[in-house]
Amino acid sequence: MRKLFFLFAFVCLFTLNGCGVYNFTGSGKIDAKTFQVNFFQNNADLIEPGIDRTFTNQLQDLIQNQTNLNLVKNTGDLVYEGEITDYRISPMTATADQRAAQNRLKIRINVRFTNKNKETDNFEKPFEFFYDYPADQQLTGSTLSTALKEIFDRISQDIFNESLAKW
């Protein structure tokens, strides 16, 4: 019986030892200590004031909340930079009398990611997402806030996954 206990303990210890490098975000081992998020300038043809600052802050917050990296203003090990390249509102569905029943806000952000410790991780690519809303609502106030939150949540998470989570 004693041999069986030691065998069981050895198997459990060996099994649990292999689980140490994983976490829920998928960003197991990051070869960096600091990150910086440069201001994402709004270069879209249609300008919505303040979304550049909102997105920059949201990306910073997401990385801080999902990693143990320290945010710095310059010389970060990981650097996120880019620009908002598209902010577009377009009709999506029509009613029987040829009126828009639903509109779509689509935002595209071009991102350049630099990992100073591992250059093979560097990339530049666009990320985009959309939000559909009823055509009888104006894209202002709570409708705009909800749309921006949903779009920026998704884009920020996609950027995180591409740069750190490797999913």
Image (cartoon, rainbow, N blue to C red):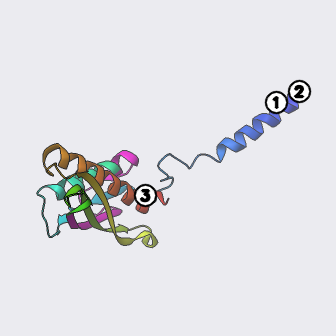
Name the front one of labels 3 and 1. Answer: 3
Q: Is residue 61 magenta?
A: no
The residue at the point 70 percent across, 43 percent down is 15
In space, the residues marked 2 and 1 are separated at their CA atoms by 6 Å
Q: Nearer the viewer, residue 86 or 34?
A: 86
- Secondary element at image label 2: loop
Asked whether disc 3 touches disc 2, contact meaning CB atoms under 8 Å apart, the reply is no
Q: Nearer the viewer, residue 34 or 41?
A: 41
* Percent x, y of residue 88: 20, 64
Q: Provide the residue designation for mark 3.
A: 161
Q: Is residue 78 magenta?
A: yes
The residue at the point 88 percent across, 27 percent down is 1
Q: Earlier in the sequence, mark 3 or mark 2?
A: 2
In space, the residues marked 3 and 1 are separated at their CA atoms by 42 Å
The residue at the point 46 percent across, 72 percent down is 120
Q: Nearer the viewer, residue 63 or 117?
A: 63
On residue 5, the disc is 1
Q: Quadrant of residue 112?
A: bottom left
On residue 88, the disc is none
Identified by mark 3, the residue type is: Asn
Q: Provide the residue designation for mark 2.
A: 1
Asked whether disc 2 touches disc 1, contact meaning CB atoms under 8 Å apart, the reply is yes
Which residues are drawn in magenta? 63-88
**From what the image shows, is residue 134 above or below residue 114?**
above
In space, the residues marked 3 and 2 are separated at their CA atoms by 48 Å
Identified by mark 2, the residue type is: Met
Identified by mark 1, the residue type is: Phe
Looking at the image, residue 155 sits to the left or right of residue 101; the answer is right
- Secondary element at image label 1: helix
Looking at the image, residue 117 sits to the left or right of residue 76; the answer is right
